[in-house]
Image (cartoon, grey):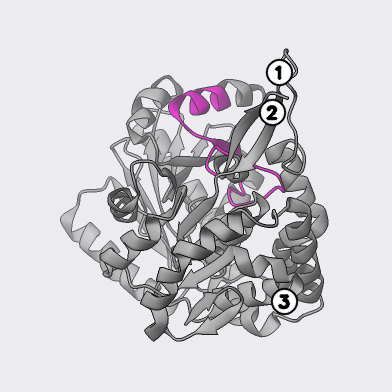
Amino acid sequence: MILYRGKLYPDSMQDELIARLDGDIPRILGGERLTARRVIAACGRMYEKAAAGKYDELARPILQDFGISYARYQDMVRAFSAEMLGYKCAVELGGDGEELTPLQDGTRRLLAPLGVLFHIAAGNVEGLPAYSVAEGLLAGNLNILKLPAGDGGISVRLLSDLIEEDALLADYIYVFDVPSTETETLARLAKYADGVVVWGGDAAQRAARTLADVNSKLIPWGHKLSFAYATEWASDEDLRTLARHICTTEQVLCSSCQGIFLDSEDIGTLQTFAERFFGIFREENLLVGKTDPAMRGRNTVNLLCDRIEGTHVRIYSADGVSVTVDADRELQLSLTFRNVWVKALPRREIVAALKNQKGYLQTCGLLCAEEERGELADLLVRAGVVRVTRGDLSRTVFGEAHDGTYPLREYTRIVEIQD
């Protein structure tokens, strides 16, 4: 299904509708300007309806799959309220996308949209494609969205409803259900873009680079790795918060903890710590409830193979969770679904061990004494980490950056006008 200027069309009209962009894009960009205020107002009205339960039938299956409570869902959708979107614009754009501090000679400096954004969305988070478009709208851009496989109509539904809140948005939203194998069609869409926004892993990023025109800005939101760093002073409360985070996120988010580095180089200390965390991990696992049976079965087989191969120092496992002690110092993806690794990493080697993972580092949950926190946080930042939290790595704060940058700044440009 295609969404084009507020109307739904069958996929069979894809070529005809793409051809229309040649005339529609210049006309729209030269017409009535889309302001952040209008987008905020429209999203705010949608939020009020969501808060009243309008989208519960879409949300509840997703919440069940990811183990997210309805209360947390209500808190998440609050990001679309007029209050929170206004705050987002104030933080990321220094206001609502209007005038910046003038230059010394009086030249005006303004934030202007890039123009046209082509969003290549990923399907690992329901609703993410629509959210990506909403951010593009806040920055004043015309948005072309390539749906991910298996979207199931959620993005078209949400964006159609948003257009109902303000008819002007119809000119700024275009959704095409183009398979990733249709590279020629994707290249046709990409040629219209001033910025190509791509969500996904290395393969998706590489493919987008071949599509993007040399004069188009590539804006990648790639897969990231997150982890915890603990010292001997990490409290049981901190470790319990971390264990709960691992169980509730199932380690599938970019901000999910994959493993724990310990500030030590002694293998005995490492095993003692692993046993301590494993006990807490099992308790939180039982409180949260069992993970997906298929994933649990998969990991049981993987752990059995690991035991037979004997490449690990020690494996602790029970009740569907595991802690694997390893002798290396590599940051890597875990088995996920409540299976973590524990490795020794003295603080003096943090930068050397992590710097080779440039571009992949995101969140570190730092569990230590308060007097150590400043020194360790500084080392982690110098290694490339962009977000340092405590035990709940996936906690969200309105206005925080995304992977070390502000999306709305990525979707805008600074223009200077001498009067």
Kindly identify which residue carries mark 1.
Answer: 103
Can you tell which of label 2 and label 3 is closer to the viewer? 2
Rounded to the nearest whole Å, what is the CA distance between mark 3 and mark 1? 40 Å
Report the amino acid beneath label 1.
Leu
Expressed as whole percent of the image width and height from the top left, the position of residue 363 reads 52, 42
Asked if marks 2 and 3 touch (Cβ < 8 Å), the reply is no
User: Does any portion of residue 401 appear in the rendered image?
Assistant: no
> For the residue carrying disc 1, how many other residues have a C-alpha within 10 Å: few (<14), some (14-19), or many (20+)?
few
- Residue farthest top in this picture: 104
Rounded to the nearest whole Å, what is the CA distance between mark 2 and mark 1? 7 Å
SS of the residue at dot 1?
Answer: loop
> For the residue carrying disc 2, how many other residues have a C-alpha within 10 Å: few (<14), some (14-19), or many (20+)?
some
Asked if marks 2 and 1 touch (Cβ < 8 Å), the reply is yes
Expressed as whole percent of the image width and height from the top left, the position of residue 56 reads 70, 81
Magenta stretch, residue numbers: 376-405
Rounded to the nearest whole Å, what is the CA distance between mark 2 and mark 3? 34 Å
Who comes first in sequence, dot 3 or dot 1?
1
Looking at the rendered structure, which numbered label has been put on residue 164? 3
Report the amino acid beneath label 3.
Glu
> For the residue carrying disc 3, how many other residues have a C-alpha within 10 Å: few (<14), some (14-19), or many (20+)?
some
SS of the residue at dot 3?
Answer: helix
- Camera-side residue of 119 and 343: 119
Residue 378 counted in the magenta span: yes
Q: Is residue 306 above or below residue 366?
A: below
Residue ID at (54%, 37%)? 404
Q: Is residue 315 above or below residue 304?
A: above
Report the amino acid beneath label 2.
Arg
Kindly identify which residue carries mark 2.
Answer: 109
Expressed as whole percent of the image width and height from the top left, the position of residue 247 reads 54, 62
Residue 230 counted in the magenta span: no
